[in-house]
Amino acid sequence: MEGSRESAGGVGAPEGEARFALSAAQRRLAEDARRDGREVLAPLAASGTPGRVNRPLVRALGEHGLLPALFPERVGGSRKADGSALELCVVREALALESTEAETALAMQGLGGYPILQSGTEALVRRWVPGIVRGEVVPAFALSEPEHGSDAAALETRAERDGHGYRLTGEKTWISNAPEADVYLVFARTTPDTGARGVTAFVVPGDARGLTGAPIDLVAPHPLGRLELDGVSVSAGEVLGDVDRGFRVAMRTLDLFRPSVGAFAVGMAQAALDAAIRHAGERRAFDKPLREFQAVSHALAEMATRTEAARLLVYAAAAAYDRGEPSVTRSSAMAKLFATETAQWVVDAAIQIHGAAALERGHLLEHLYREVRAPRIYEGTSEIQREVIARELYR
């Protein structure tokens, strides 16, 4: 891929720019994540098979302390308490600047591990979470279904009582790390015709009898697939949280992770902006650098302004989550909406500045152009975020 991906300082924005105030420890965390991403994780990502779980990469995230930085000490992490949304954003933005594959692997470990940590019994936490933190166990968050993506409360996968447990039957799709995960968080309906109030969350081992799956080939290769559950047997001890209250488990986790999707997008936007700045300073046309053309310089200014605005919105939402503010639903939706839409625009503008060279397979911007599209869809589409924001305005 093209050139160095370093920028002048901080997580992404150059030193001296207006930015959310990070502590010295958070700055060090960002610097460590960028260094590890560049020197260790990016080469591991490049050596993996596209569209498959990269276990050496996931293990390296644990060995280099990036996964432990997101989890508390009681499960093998390095934090005194449970996860900070702000520090999750710091790590995700920093990794996105160096390796989108490493960023995604880290995010999926967190998205799959935190429901167990937050809502599981002590036995479930001990069985699964320390391995997730070390990068030895790969989890998956299995909520979406073929007919129910945005309307997840309408899911149809059934959980029927069977002696001292349940039997799960149905289909899940667009599940990250499927079908190769070691453990799945499966959301299934325990009470018919009750919407979100009749859904229960279950922990399902990846080798459970009756559980099969297949990968899905994406425009940006990413370990993702579909699952078939044919009477998969689970015990009552593998229920997460309360029966019929599984949607709370999902939303509690998504509230933590939604602002950090915006941080991922900001990292990609910053990488594209950095590439455009370098190219516009080096490439000459009509006997002068591209940056001396007003159309290019104004585009760069707009790209930088939108990227910084997205960063500030993301970090403010994450800080609001950490403070336990009641407005976190609205601020998180705003952050994800604005950051993901901004990233798509910035990457597209960077490609326009580069011209045809950016469309060649293997170019950084060709890679980012494919990667940047999905965050506007997963964990709540842009349209759903606007619905959430509008609803919160009248709450």
Image: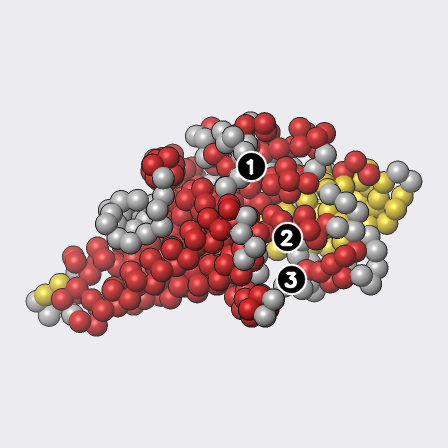
In the rendered image, the residue lying farthest to the left is 287
Residue 286 x %, y %: 10, 70
Q: Residues under labels 1 and 2: Cα distance?
A: 16 Å
The residue mark sitting in front, 3 or 2, is: 2
Give me the residue at 25% from left, 64% from top. Answer: 300
- Which label sits on residue 251? 2
Q: Earlier in the sequence, mark 1 or mark 2?
A: 1
Q: Secondary structure at mark 2?
A: helix
* Residue nearest the observer in this picture, 211 or 152: 152
Quick one: 380 or 220, which is closer to the camera? 380
Q: Reading the chain from its start, which is encountered first: label 3 or label 1?
A: 1
Tag of residue 174: none
Which image quarter: residue 293? bottom left
Q: Earlier in the sequence, mark 3 or mark 2?
A: 3
Q: Which residue is mark 1?
A: 82
The one nearer the camera, 147 or 210, is: 147
Q: Which residue occupies 57% across, 66% down?
A: 392
Q: Residue flagged by tag 3: what amino acid is it?
A: Gly
Where residue 48 sits in the image (x, y, percent)? 47, 41
